[in-house]
Each structure stands twice: as structure tokens, then as C-alpha cells.
Image (tube, helix red, strand yellow):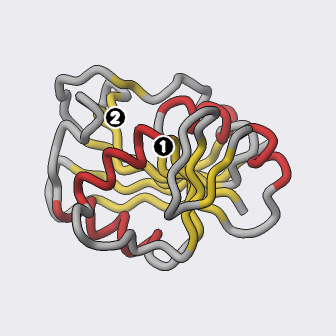
Amino acid sequence: MINLIWAMDINWLIGKNNKLPWRYQEDLNYFKSLTANKTVLMGINTYYSMKGYYKNTPFPFKKVYVASRSKTITDVTMVRDAQEFLKGYQDELWVLGGSAIFKLALEVADKLYITWILKPYQGDTHFPYFDLVDDFKVLNEKAGLNPDLKFMVYGKTK
């Protein structure tokens, strides 16, 4: 089962200068509750971004895969061909970003966990466009305690 998890604003913005453009503790808690002690895949830029948040503490994940064609990090398992890796992956996997990895993972995703930020932000990285309405159906929807947040879970229809 391949799960994608991310937060995006109403314009599908997901990042600014390799960081989140917002900070909602409720969303961070949601992310941690779903991904803690799980196997995750992220791109190299997402790895560096997350390292900024986990400066001197280890990631809370069971196993970390990082996709990069050229760079090597010693404390994770490197993936040189993310598309092939995703097509052949058999167990539960949580895809954390970034944009290029999400684009590849959408082809094989079973579920999408999207935190909708219900207002616009400024940034430089957007989620790659895809047909959310035709390719996925809503499995769960929950309003956040913060009125700016809506937590949605989608399942693949095709």
C-alpha cells in the first residue's frame, strides 16, 4: 500500500524555499501520528528540509528511503530510480515529497492523505496537477480544530 501525505493550500502550494510556508501544530501532529515508525520515501530536498526540523534528533520513522540520482547520504537507504522503486514496492510505504517524487508516486498511490490549508500562501513549489476528482474518491473528511485546516483521505478509483 502506497500512501502519499502532504499539506497544500487552496492553490496547491506545498513549499517555499524548501520549507513549509505555514506552521500548524495540528497538521504536524496529524503527520506524525500517521508516519511515526513507518517506512517512508522522500526526495533529497525533502530530506534536507526535514533535517532542518529534526536538527539533533533522529527521524521518527522505521525506515527511510531517500531518492537521489547522484547524492549519497549514509544514514538512510538511497534510491537511485524512484519510479522503478515505487513500481516494485510491496509493503506499506509513506511518500513524503517533494514535488517530483509525488508526481511519480501518484501513478501507484493507493491513498492520499491531504491536509488542505483553506487560504492562500506565498511560495515557490506546487503539488503537480492531477485529476483528483476522477482518479480518487473521498474516503474520509474531517474539519480541523483550526478553521484553516481540513484533513482529507482519498482512495484510488482506477
The answer to whether marks 1 and 2 mark residues whose Cβ atoms lie closer than 8 Å is yes
Secondary structure under the numbered disc 1 in the rendered image? strand
Cα–Cα span, label 1 and label 2: 9 Å
Residue identifier under label 1: 97
**Kind of residue at badge 1:** Gly
**Towards the viewer: 72 or 99:** 72
The residue closer to the viewer here, 55 or 124, is: 55
| Picture quarter with the C terminus | top right
62 on left or right of 156: left
Q: What kind of element bears circle 2?
A: strand
At x 75%, y 48%, the residue is: 86
Q: Is residue 115 above or below residue 30?
A: above
Dividing the picture into quadrants, the one containing residue 70 is top right
Tell whether 138 sits left or right of 135. Answer: left
- Of the residues under marks 1 and 2, which one precedes in the sequence? 2
Graded by Cα atoms within 10 Å as few (under 14), some (14 to 19) or many (20 or more), the crowding at tag 1 reads many
Image location of residue 110, percent across then percent down:
70, 54
Q: Quadrant of the N terminus?
A: bottom right
Q: How many marks?
A: 2
Residue 21 locus on image (x, y percent) = 19, 36
Which amino acid type corresponds to the residue marked 2 in the rendered image? Ile
> Residue at image x 26%, y 63%?
54
Q: Residue at x 79, y 57 (%)?
A: 89
Tell me the number on the disc at residue 14: 2
> Image point 85% across, 52% down: which residue?
88
Image disc number at residue 12: none
